[in-house]
Image: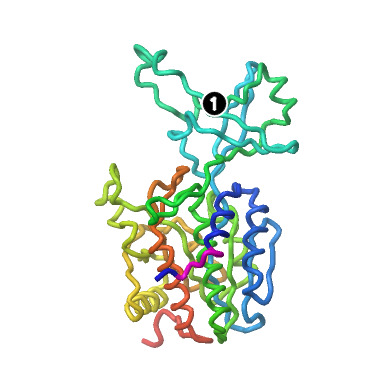
Amino acid sequence: MSIITKKSEAFLERYLNNASPTGFEAPGQKLWLEYLKPYIDEWQLDNYGTAYGIINPGQDFKVVIEGHADEISWFVNYISDEGFINVIRNGGSDHIIAPSKRVNIHTKKGIITGIFGWPAIHTRRGKDANLSPTLENIFIDVGAKDKEEVLEMGIHVGCVITYPDEFMVLNDRYYVGRALDNRMGGFCVAEVARLLHENKIKLPYSLYIVNSVQEEIGLKGATMVADTIKPNVAICTDVTHDTNTPLVAKKKHGDVKAGKGPSVTYAPAVHNKLLNLIIDTADEHEIPIQREAASRSTGTDTDAFAYSNGGVPSALISLPLKYMHTTVETAHKDDVNNVIKLIYESLLKIEDGHNFKYFDKI
């Protein structure tokens, strides 16, 4: 049975359709806070745009649940005399999918539409027969006759570029869209706040519902907000690869499949006691989970929280995702529901002053 309501799903669609590129997350954060406010006691916004709500503020013991708000994008890097635009990445944007994609260029004059052009197949002969997209050869066409006209449109070096692709539901089973990585995490933690409010749960600690910025360029928002909040525990959520799609090597990337439940990660940054609490919770409530191992780092905001403030017990709950960093990122509805349920039930097992010491005595 779904715990996501029609109202929740309508918010999710608005939230995913809104552009929220790294460094320019403000419009998305406004939407997220507007949805979250009825379910929290206080909210805060830091200097770089990380937003968080607080339930039961003022307690000595503080728990964070967290997702990140930013999506990958492009920056205008060069405008040729002929009026074509070359780009650099803002986050891990995939140059392979760029050709033939429509784009929105964000300017002070508003959105300027454009397209990633590509030479027609008829012109790619001989040494160019197998021409492939690279970061150096992809380009945007805004229909301008020359550089001067591009500049007159309000486009300049540094303008951010996003894709306009919108939310859809596939086969009544999957959510599809851009930036499920990781606005779906922000959605999940907001839904946890909703459930706590609707079920009138009184937590014995302060709960911080965090939507961090700038994860896609190195966990920057989480690094900042961890120092601000100084939590005692952090449960982070992000996406992970569905490795059962074609062309993905399971021996290298693990065995995870959309529809089989959230994935929990074993890694140096993941605190064993907190991880075991989450796994025991999944067993108790018959929430399906999958397991992964991360060498050295998780590559998620979990690392930022874990290694802050002298060490914060942290864990990672991941949503299996097909086609990450494309405009058709795909997540199973059941997995989204179970991420929400697993975080919610795990919070109910954490007590004020819960013992997360690595070991009690020798």
Tell which of 67 and 260 is nearer to you. Answer: 260
Up the image or down, 125 lies above or below 32; here it is above
- Residue drawn at x 46%, y 85% is 355
Residue 120 position, x and y percent, is 44, 18
Q: Is 6 inside the magenta-drawn segment?
A: yes
Q: How is the image coloured?
A: rainbow
Instruction: Pick the quarter of the image with the N terminus.
Output: bottom left
The quadrant in which the C terminus is found is: bottom left
Examine the image and state in which quarter residue 158 appears: top right
Please state if 307 lies on the left or on the right of 339 as rendered: right
Q: Residue extending furthest left?
A: 251
**Residue 171 position in % (x across, y down):** 37, 52
Disc 1 designates what residue?
139
- Asked if 96 appears above or below 81 in the picture, the reply is below
How many marks are shown on the rendered structure? 1
- Position of 185 compared to 210: left or right? left
Q: Can residue 63 be found in the magenta stretch? A: no
Answer above or below: position of 340 versus 109: below
Residue sitting at 42 percent across and 58 percent down? 297
Q: Residues within 10 Å of mark 1 (few under 14, many from 20)?
A: many
Q: For the magenta stretch, what is the residue range?
A: 3-8
Expressed as whole percent of the image width and height from the top left, the position of residue 356 reads 45, 81
Observer-nearest of 252 and 156: 156
Above or below residue 341? Residue 122 is above
Picture quadrant of residue 269: bottom left
Residue 110 drawn at (x, y percent): 71, 38
Q: Nearer the viewer, residue 260 or 324?
A: 260
Residue drawn at point x = 71 percent, y = 58 percent = 47
Secondary structure beneath dot 1 equals strand
Query: Which amino acid, mark 1?
Result: Phe
